[in-house]
Amino acid sequence: AALTPVTGSGSSYVGPAMTDWQNGAKSRGIPINYSANSSPAGVNQFGDRTVDFAGTEAEVSSIIAAGGGGLSAQTRGYQYVPDVAGAIALMYNVKDQGGKRVDYLHLSREVIGRIFSRDITRWNDPAITATNGGKSLPDQPITLVGRTGQSGTTALFYDFIAHAAPDAYNRFVSRNVGNGMGNLPAGVRPIQLPGQGPDAEWYRLLADSDQIATTMDNATIPFSIGYDEFAYAQRYEVPTAWVQNGAGQYTQPYAENIAAALKHAELRPDLSQKLDRVYTNTDPKSYPISAYSYVMMPCTNGRDTCRGGYGDPGKTETITAFLEHVACDGQINMARIGYSPLPPNLSQEVMNSNARLTGQPAKQLNADNCANPTFRGSLGDGAASPPDPLVTGGIINPDGKPKAGTGATGPSVSAGPSTGPTGGDKTATATAGPDEESAGGGSKNWREASPASYDEGGFGGFGGWAALVLFVAIVAPLVVRGVIRKLRGS
Amino acid sequence: MTTTLTPPVAPAPRKLVKRRPSETTRQDRFAAFGCAVSATLLTWFVMHLLLDSPGWLADLIVAYLLYLTMLYLVTRDRLGKLAASDRLVSTVVVTGALVLLAPLLSLLLYIVVEGAPYLRLGFFTHDMSTVAPTDPVTETGGLHAVIGTLEQTALTLILVVPLGVLTAVFLNETRSRFRRPVRIMVDAMSGLPSIVAGLFVYAALIIPGIQAGVGLFSYNGLMATLALTMVMLPTVTRTVDVVLRLVPDGLREASLALGASRARTVWSVVLPTARTGVTTAVILGIARVAGETAPLLFTSFGALGMNANPFSDPQESIPLFIYRFIKQPLENVQQRGYVGALVLILLIFGLFAIARVVGRDRSKRKAKKTTVKTQENR
Amino acid sequence: MTIAPPRPDPSPPGAPVRRAITEVLSRADRAFRRVTTGAGLTMLAILVVIGFFLVYRSGPAFDTSGFGFFTTIRFDPASGVLGVLGLLYGTIVVALIAVLIAVPLSILAALFITEYSSGRIRGFLTGLVDLLAAIPSLLYGLWGFAFLGPQIVPISLWLTENLGWFPPFSSKENALYIQSMFIAGLVVSLMVLPITTSVIREVFAQTPPGEKEAALALGSTRWGMVKTVMLPFGRGGIIGGSMLGLGRALGETIAVSLLLPQVPEITKHVLQFGGATISGFIANNAGASGLALSGLMAAGLVLFVFTLATNFTASVIISKSRSGAGVDA
Amino acid sequence: MTDTEVSYVDSPARPLVELTGGPPPGAAELESREIGAWFGDRLVLEGVSLRMPAKEVTALIGPSGCGKSTFLRILNRMHELVPSASLTGEVLLDGKDIYADGTRPQQVRLRIGMVFQKPNPFPAMSIRDNVLAGLKLAGVKCGDKDALVEQSLERAGLWREVRDRLSSPGGALSGGQQQRLCIARSLAVQPNVLLMDEPCSALDPTSTRRIEQTIAEIGHEVTIVIVTHNMQQAQRVSDHCAFFLAAENEPGRVIEHGPTDTIFNAPSDERTHDYVNGRFG
Amino acid sequence: MTDTEVSYVDSPARPLVELTGGPPPGAAELESREIGAWFGDRLVLEGVSLRMPAKEVTALIGPSGCGKSTFLRILNRMHELVPSASLTGEVLLDGKDIYADGTRPQQVRLRIGMVFQKPNPFPAMSIRDNVLAGLKLAGVKCGDKDALVEQSLERAGLWREVRDRLSSPGGALSGGQQQRLCIARSLAVQPNVLLMDEPCSALDPTSTRRIEQTIAEIGHEVTIVIVTHNMQQAQRVSDHCAFFLAAENEPGRVIEHGPTDTIFNAPSDERTHDYVNGRFG
Ligand SMILES: Nc1ncnc2c1ncn2[C@@H]1O[C@H](COP(=O)(O)OP(=O)(O)OP(=O)(O)O)[C@@H](O)[C@H]1O
Ligand SMILES: Nc1ncnc2c1ncn2[C@@H]1O[C@H](COP(=O)(O)OP(=O)(O)OP(=O)(O)O)[C@@H](O)[C@H]1O
Ligand SMILES: [Mg+2]
Ligand SMILES: [Mg+2]
């Protein structure tokens, strides 16, 4: 049967993943269109019924609290469907006493919570010194960097903050009720940061994730720390903080760490995520600030918020097929492009969501009918984390406890064998290779199955010459024409 | 008083030597060169040896100011105050023109450097629907975006050209009492922010359209066209208006004096005469519209795959293509955006080249006319 | 062939009566008039529809805030506070900075094109100015953020340190100099340059050659001629061109949305981080719905009216100036 | 009036090519009665009554700004194209008022052709199309267009020079040729009267002489009214002459009119005498 | 040469107001040697050698387009303002080539004033400022500006008419007054030579006569070169006359020159005879 094209819009965070999924879907004849602008926009458009599904990290309640709409989505009815896991990294730009850019920052969850609630406001705060091998940073105020306007990333990050340092967070929120964050009911997280007031003085808001990463990369904001999707940190090789997890270990948000953390993710009845136990996960590998991104789509039964599916059965067919692709084959590449694949239980939840839309029994996924690498205990390419410089430098123990007697000297930048996440990336790729093999072992890898129409392209391999040829193609006729005219004229 | 006239010089068979007296003498050029050298050295001395220079931009500014001062003083000493201020202003004016050049070149260079190494002819032969984010940049396919841009621009033209030209004719060739309000409205419309035009189409047409299930009023190329029309219409109308004003009244009178009606005069004389100018105006309008991004986000929506039908389903265009990729966290995906930007620039260059060729004949004629005019004025 | 009867002439000699000239229109002429008037009125209609739509959609916002919409700095739908003042302030400041930078440069460029260059260079520059106008705003924004911004920071620093006593340049300790209205204005000025340059150039080109030659024949230098003849003559055009540029700067969208934090506030320090403009703010929050969207529409309406007023003033000034130069876009 | 030495017109006696929808054949007499003209509220012309006999050349002379052009433009209803312009009086074309109610200006202008000071061929058209422009613009039909083009260009004395390049653009000719092209264009619709407003003042001496010869030739077939600043030219080409003068802050008036010889050699008004003898103007 | 009936100049014998930085006092002789001129690649003037004696009036006559204006503009280096223009030959001002290397055109133009066909006062300036414009523009200093204004206006025959409204704008005068204002403006810097390009052709008879009288007066103090189309005017105002002519597609040349009487009454060239008697042009 011909599938009706389906459109979605929303989160820019899942943009690259959506591109990958759309490609995969296309190779199976599933017509999907996704336009990445922002989570709230997606939810609103979904509510206005101008798109068929939304991609979002922010929840409807947060959007309503921010006064930016969301009500229409309630009217239409929705369910959240997790589609991929990711993590928020802390990028920072701090110079130590010697004027060298610090690249080893280690922070505990509580300290992060207090920093972003503006409870800790200076870099030489003892709480920060304590987690960095006892060496204190300069006595400078902390400038925070975040996203302007409404953003799903802000929602995720402040959910973490709310759990990491509840008191400081609550004070922060109540201080800023009238400053643009909105009046937040209990359990509802802000999607927007204060634009004014004393706290806003120290918050630098930038238009998008890319700007945050570039700014941190250029070190234009001195003594600052900001939150951003980890993929941007990798792209610009910006120093990101090591975050202490429930086991006391310091980790960075590589796929394996995200996956480890999200093993403890719980889903509320509406499938929205409850991450309390992720933040406190005691798996030594877990990275606490991990979360899922959702697809928001209608449903016919099984939830309070379900108010009916699509009028067009063709759309139902398309989107269920698409989500099935997302749940399984779609996860193969995720670790490689900066996400972490869904764990099996959530892949199964995707199928359950489909069932809620169609009213049919859910398909049960297993390692044989689903190519999601997590079904085989792997994460795909690019999943492993680099070693901790403070550990390799012998300043703290692998369990996160400071080594006795090293506090006085403190770490030096060159202490670690790798000076940034990239170095580790390479090892990660190397070790992850075999996993990838097993994941794509059968014909499951859709990429392998798709016709390699563009492989050589027929034209490849002459670099910037293409531009030149094009330019000449445009200019040459004009020149020839001019010459001919001149000759004729004289 | 009778011997006032020189005896005629013997007409020797000589070859006439053209002289083209120039305002600047060799001494002037020497002085300028000397000032430039000494300003450079002084800057280096002051900024780098005495002070800690904050950067090349500051150096440049200081050197420039020093050069101006020296040039002024030297010229004043040689030729007096008036000549000195003249020289000063000439220098400033020339720099002003260069300053105009600098950002453009810098911008172009930036985009070419980022985009050119990855541009392949393959860009024009396939779309993005089979290209994964992890694929190399050279695999980028933009056919769907190019087709979308071409179709949307063509549709925009179909809407804008008749309406714009007719309105310009209305403003120029009739004596209606609505001329003034219309002219004000055209002016006002050119101040309509493009994002508002996009929002208008989205909120007034697309939302009700999709809810009512009217296929034509949903995300598609046509809706983008409508938004672009609102952006382009005033620009084209105003430029055509100016071009029509340039048509000499003598031609209109000649036509009327031959017994032509107003309509015939416009159709057979005014518009053909202004044709090249109108074409140039339209092409420049296209160039501007081809790069509009804001109003497209909510109207044509964008797509990864080919959609050659502008009347249904989302359609990509080059600006959307750029916008989609240029901010993403993967390096190769970002570079796809720059490849798109390069193609857009090339497209605009191409349009400009065409506009220049089309407009050249007109400028030649105009040049002739102006010489005739200056002759008369003497 | 009858000779028309001589018409009685009731008026006394010396005060002849004017004849009414009746013009009988042919069918083609009537159709012509209808079609062109139709086109003109369509234009009117489009604008009126947009205007009405904006008014209609912004109704709820005005209901919520009343007149306070114009006096409130904050735009905060979360707490039900809608105000356009902060946005309008940023819009105007950015536009003014843009115009203040663009106009002197435009005058110089226009002077160069009309007076100081010849033949080929003149054509090249004229084309270049048009080309500058066609470069997409998005690219300007990217370039401004990634390339220009960092270059400007040291200059902002320097200005703050040395001209801090001058209010717009004064700054707090630990202030940040990226994403300032100054940088945004600088980038917008590049987008304004083409229009102001072409208007001013056109006016300069219309300076009566007789007056120019008169000045030169008196032994004036070129600058003397420019000062006594061209600048006074072009004054109307310069003012009008600046206003037109202002109109364009007010509406600039994508680039500004990337170059400013888009937080509505009144930042006195133009070199310092902060600021928002109406169109940029709309672009950044375009996904809103409900009251927020209505507030954005209201802000759009304010901008629309504001630009309308600016453009209108510009065309009045240009048409009143001695040059009577055409306004072209 | 001087006679032409060389005839540039090849066959003046040949019957004209037939047109349908054009003006009635033959020359017509033009007469103005008590013409006055305003621009806005400024009266620039007053009480001009003048008869311009058929098949003869009438010259209008006078210093700058005295209203000659205005008068000429009133004669074929071009005056009303100026938004603020108004007028009084009557203009009779073969006895019929061209300003009568219900008269269509197009019809009037088709019968009364006009040639302007500055040659203004249509730059977007070829020479041939320029000649035929009047037909196309006024909706006149012609069976044999080629013959009409040849005949009109011959009458304007331009045929020999351009017959090989009829399809090159009209703007590519020299000034004098352009002016003759404009004359040919006016002649193509076979008007009854031809008005000329300083047709030679933008031209070089040679071209001027050429045009004067053309005028002399066609002056036997159509009524011609010509404005000129050049006394010698007026003497050379015209049969009748009218001298216009406007005192300071007064409207222009006809001071004297009559046969050219009389005006130049035995004027009755002193101002005329002064003017034709170059005392002023 | 006619003599003036009424002297409009109140005190021609009074010594001139002193200037510093202006041209050297007195009239100067101007001489052109083998001047040729091009516009682009088109030669419009060839082999013009002419001596214009100090304190006399030389008239340049000839039909339109023969290069009179071009020649006049070469005499004070205005020619080079046209982008495509070039020239050959020498122009000697009191024996010194004004085109010599290192000579600044501003200096030349300060010594050789110019009055144009269309009056072109600076419309935004007051009458007084218009007169003083030359000083300001050329950087000439003057101790007693009021005296200079009065004297210049007197020499141009305008003082009586405008002395009560020196601060009203220059554009508010009538055409003839504007032209005299332009003459006053040129005279204010006390040039050695004054060039006039058809100064009366845009004026009414009364103003024309006024200006001719002015020329006659100042002709005793500065060297004047005047272009005119009006034979009578040339006869009335000039001491010497040069007749320019350009054959078709040929550059303009001086056909004949000499004292005005000779040129008009006993020309040696037939073409001159034809021209001055109105046979063509
Ligand atoms: N369009 C117009 N609007 C207002 N006044 C005008 C207009 N055209 C002409 N005039 C005025 O009408 C008067 C007569 O002008 P007209 O052009 O008829 O004179 P003319 O005799 O043809 O002069 P010339 O010999 O210079 O061509 C002049 O004073 C002129 O200023
Ligand atoms: N700016 C110019 N560019 C090109 N050709 C020019 C220019 N000015 C004048 N000419 C040409 O040079 C020739 C001489 O012109 P010039 O103006 O000197 O003649 P003139 O004798 O002053 O004529 P008129 O009596 O009409 O003023 C003419 O053929 C003219 O076409
Ligand atoms: Mg006239
Ligand atoms: Mg001349």
Image (tube, coloured by chain):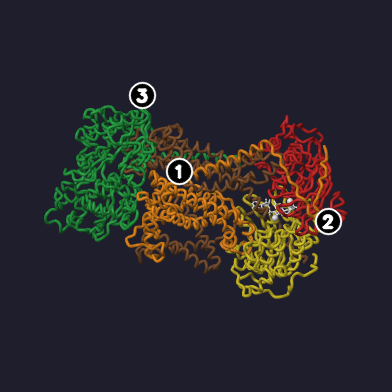
Chain colours: A green, B brown, C orange, D red, E yellow
x and y percentages locating residue A170 in the rendered image: 25, 52
Q: Nearer the viewer, residue E184 or B303?
A: B303
Mark 3 residue element: loop
Cβ–Cβ below 8 Å for labels 2 and 1? no
- From the image, tell me which residue sits under label 1: B292
Residue at 40 percent of width and 57 percent of height = C266
Residue E125 lies, with reference to residue A192, above or below; the image says below
- From the image, tell me which residue sits under label 2: D272
- From the image, tell me which residue sits under label 3: A1
Q: Nearer the viewer, residue A120 or B264?
A: A120
Q: Nearer the viewer, residue A104 or A33?
A: A33
- In which quarter of the view is residue E183 placed? bottom right
Which chain's residue wears label 1? B
The crowd level at tag 1 (other Cα within 10 Å; few <14, some 14-19, many 20+) is many
Looking at the rendered structure, whether the residues under marks 2 and 1 are on a common chain is answered as: no
Q: Which mark is residue B119?
A: none
Q: CA distance from mark 3 to mark 2?
A: 100 Å
Residue E274 lies, with reference to residue D141, above or below; the image says below
Q: CA distance from mark 3 to mark 1?
A: 38 Å
- For this view, does B126 lie left or right of residue D52? left
Q: Nearer the viewer, mark 2 or mark 1?
A: 1
